[in-house]
């Protein structure tokens, strides 16, 4: 199986409805990996400012390129039976 390339993205993760920051690294990791069907583990998220919900996350390179192509700066998703907002902070 070929290796998967990942890119680091600085992002703010918050609860969708309350906008409370996500400060738990295990939850952030599960959110990022939730839809992955690759079977390849993602690199661990890195804390930047957990009380503000700011993390360095690692996404597959093709996903990041698609976000760039679309000019996407944030997205919402449902994962682990909750809703979240991921907002890219523009630092890589």
Image (cartoon, rainbow, N blue to C red):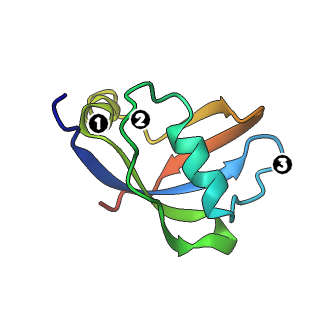
Residue placed most toward the observer, 61 or 19:
61
Earlier residue among tags 3 and 2: 3
Q: Secondary structure at mark 2?
A: loop
Marks 3 and 1 close (CB-CB < 8 Å): no
Residues at marks 1 and 2 touching, judged by CB atoms closer than 8 Å:
yes
Quick check: marks 3 and 2 in contact, CB under 8 Å? no
Mark 1 neighbour class, 10 Å CA radius: few under 14, some 14 to 19, many 20 or more: few
User: In this figure, which residue is indicated by the disc labeled 2?
Assistant: 72
- Which residue extends farthest left? 2
What is the number of the mark on residue 18?
Answer: 3
Count of marks, rendered view: 3
Tell me the CA gap for discs 3 and 1. Answer: 27 Å
Q: Say above or below: 72 vs 29.
A: above
Q: Residues within 10 Å of mark 3 (few under 14, many from 20)?
A: few
Q: Which mark is residue 68?
A: 1
Displayed quadrant of residue 67 = top left
The answer to which quarter of the image holds residue 61 is top left
* Outermost residue, right side: 18
Query: Label 2: few (<14), some or many (≥20) within 10 Å?
Result: few
Alpha carbon distance from label 3 to label 2 = 22 Å
Residue 13 point in image, percent of width and height = 61, 53
Residue drawn at (82%, 41%), measured in percent from left and top?
17
Q: What residue appears at the point 40 percent right and 44 percent down from the top-left corner? A: 41
Q: Residue at x 44, y 42 (%)?
A: 73
Residue at point 62%, 71% (across, down): 50
Please indicate whether residue 58 sits to the left or right of residue 75 in the image. left
Where residue 29 sits in the image (x, y, percent)?
Answer: 55, 51
**Is residue 5 shown left or right of residue 39?**
left
Judged from the image, the secondary structure of the residue bearing numbered disc 3 is: loop
């Amino acid at each position: 199986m070929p290796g998967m390339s990942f890119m680091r993205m600085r992002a703010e993760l918050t609860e969708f409805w309350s906008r409370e920051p996500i400060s738990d690294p295990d939850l952030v990791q599960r959110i990022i990996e939730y839809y992955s069907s690759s079977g390849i583990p993602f690199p661990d998220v890195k804390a930047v400012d957990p009380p503000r919900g700011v993390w360095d996350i690692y996404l597959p390179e093709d996903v990041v390129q698609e976000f760039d192509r679309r000019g996407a700066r944030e997205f919402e998703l449902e994962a682990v039976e909750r809703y979240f907002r991921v907002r890219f902070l523009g630092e890589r």
